[in-house]
Image (cartoon, grey):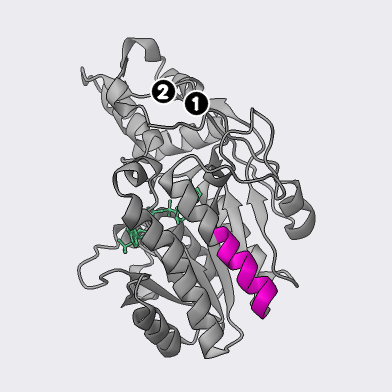
């Protein structure tokens, strides 16, 4: 029986990945900064809380990372933990850099120190590409990060590449574009919209305050995206992969789809709020997932309209 350690198991991707690996008969361990107080509501929602073993681990503390690795002795480590909000990263740049960049480095060092043949997955991000003028980003597109979050993810990406080349670690980065699901917290604009639309459809008079609705994103379905993480670690050699749908839609189109589900017009319910504009914004984001399709056999089947529909239907 293979053992997997998922760091950040309480989050959206952690919960879906745990579900996937349990289905594949893995013994699944997960970490949270404080496993005693975390509610693990996503694991409960997927009905898998009792099936996983939970540990506390502080990513930014090398001793803590090493101790968990030694206790669990995993075959595969998926590091999905760290400050994950682009907006919040402008307010907490140090916390963002420490949790993402030093967290990843601690893992790489700890794996190297134990000399165990552990395979490592790093949660990379499309935010690293920055604005590339509407083209599809691929694995060789240069990084031009435009937020503290993207800077931290870029550093982590290159740490992984360096440990792979320098020390031969089986370490991969998935450069994932935005992916959503019913488990997405309301801090993220997609879930903020979906939950408000569902309340408005029931008669709530509220308005949705939004920042820039002209931004374009490549939105996918989280349960599909976690499959790519697993596939990367099953491949015969470690590498980095762009994971995306290959299609980009504006936030206005997202709103349109969500309100249209209830035959409503989004223009009647949305207000523009300058306070929600970011200091630097990434206008268009779109990925080219052809390498993942060719080498891993992975392809996104759900696109933005499907994601909107499935998020709404899970609330109804
Ligand atoms: P979530 O925010 O849902 O989960 C991340 C987990 O990390 C949390 O459950 C939390 O666990 C832990 N965490 C949060 N803040 C910190 C912090 N400051 N220091 C240490 N740990 C922290 O993220 P997702 O599941 O959506 O994403 C998983 C990974 O993939 C993240 O690294 C994210 O940046 C990356 N990513 C996500 C994309 C997406 O569209 N969802 C796109 C591209 C990359 P706990 O509180 O239990 O410690």
Q: Using the rendered view, name the quadrant where residue 269 is placed.
A: top left
* Figure quadrant of the C terminus: top left
Q: Position of residue 200 (x, y in %)?
A: 28, 22
Q: Is residue 51 left or right of residue 275?
A: right
In the rendered image of this protein, does residue 210 appear above or below residue 73?
Answer: above
- Where is residue 75 shown, x and y percent of the image? 56, 81
Q: CA distance from mark 1 to mark 2?
A: 6 Å
Which residue is drawn at the image coordinates 77% and 58% (left, top)?
295
Report the disc number at residue 107.
none
Res 227 visible:
yes
Q: Are marks 1 and 2 in contact (CB under 8 Å)?
A: yes
What range of the chain is rendered magenta?
Answer: 157-167
Query: Does residue 74 show up magenta in the picture?
Result: no
User: Residue drawn at (69%, 53%), measured in percent from left and top?
Assistant: 298
Front-most of 68 and 37?
A: 68
Query: Residue at label 2?
Result: 212
Where is residue 235? Give x, y as percent. Answer: 72, 69
Q: Secondary structure at mark 1?
A: loop
Q: Is mark 2 within 8 Å of ligand 1?
A: no
Q: Which residue is mark 1?
A: 215
């Amino acid at each position: 029986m293979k053992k997997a350690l998922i760091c950040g198991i309480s989050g959206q991707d952690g919960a879906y990945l745990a579900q996937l690996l349990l289905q594949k008969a893995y013994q699944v361990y997960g970490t949270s900064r404080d496993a005693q107080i975390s509610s693990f509501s996503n694991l409960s929602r997927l009905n898998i809380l009792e099936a996983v073993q939970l540990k506390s681990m502080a990513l930014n503390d090398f001793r803590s990372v090493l101790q968990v690795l030694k206790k669990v002795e995993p075959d595969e480590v998926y590091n999905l933990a760290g400050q994950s909000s682009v907006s919040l990263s402008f307010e907490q740049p140090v916390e963002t850099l420490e949790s993402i960049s030093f967290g990843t480095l601690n893992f790489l060092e700890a794996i190297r120190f134990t000399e165990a043949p552990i395979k490592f997955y790093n949660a990379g991000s499309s935010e690293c590409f920055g604005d590339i003028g509407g083209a599809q980003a691929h694995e060789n597109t240069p990084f031009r990060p435009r937020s503290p979050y993207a800077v931290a993810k870029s550093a982590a990406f290159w740490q992984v590449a360096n440990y792979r080349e320098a020390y031969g670690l089986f370490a991969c980065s998935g450069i994932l574009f935005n992916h959503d699901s019913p488990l997405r917290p309301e801090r993220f604009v997609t879930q903020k919209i979906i939950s408000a639309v569902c309340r408005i459809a029931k008669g709530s008079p509220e308005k949705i305050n939004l920042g820039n609705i002209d931004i374009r994103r490549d939105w996918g379905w989280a349960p599909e995206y976690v499959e790519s993480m697993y596939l990367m670690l099953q491949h015969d050699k470690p590498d980095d992969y762009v994971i995306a749908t290959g299609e980009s839609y504006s936030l206005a189109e997202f709103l349109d789809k969500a309100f249209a589900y209830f035959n409503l017009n989004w223009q009647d319910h949305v207000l523009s709020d300058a306070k929600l504009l970011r200091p630097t914004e990434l206008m268009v984001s779109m990925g080219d997932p052809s390498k993942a399709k060719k080498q891993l056999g992975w392809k996104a089947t759900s696109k933005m309209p499907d994601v909107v529909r499935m998020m709404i239907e899970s609330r109804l």
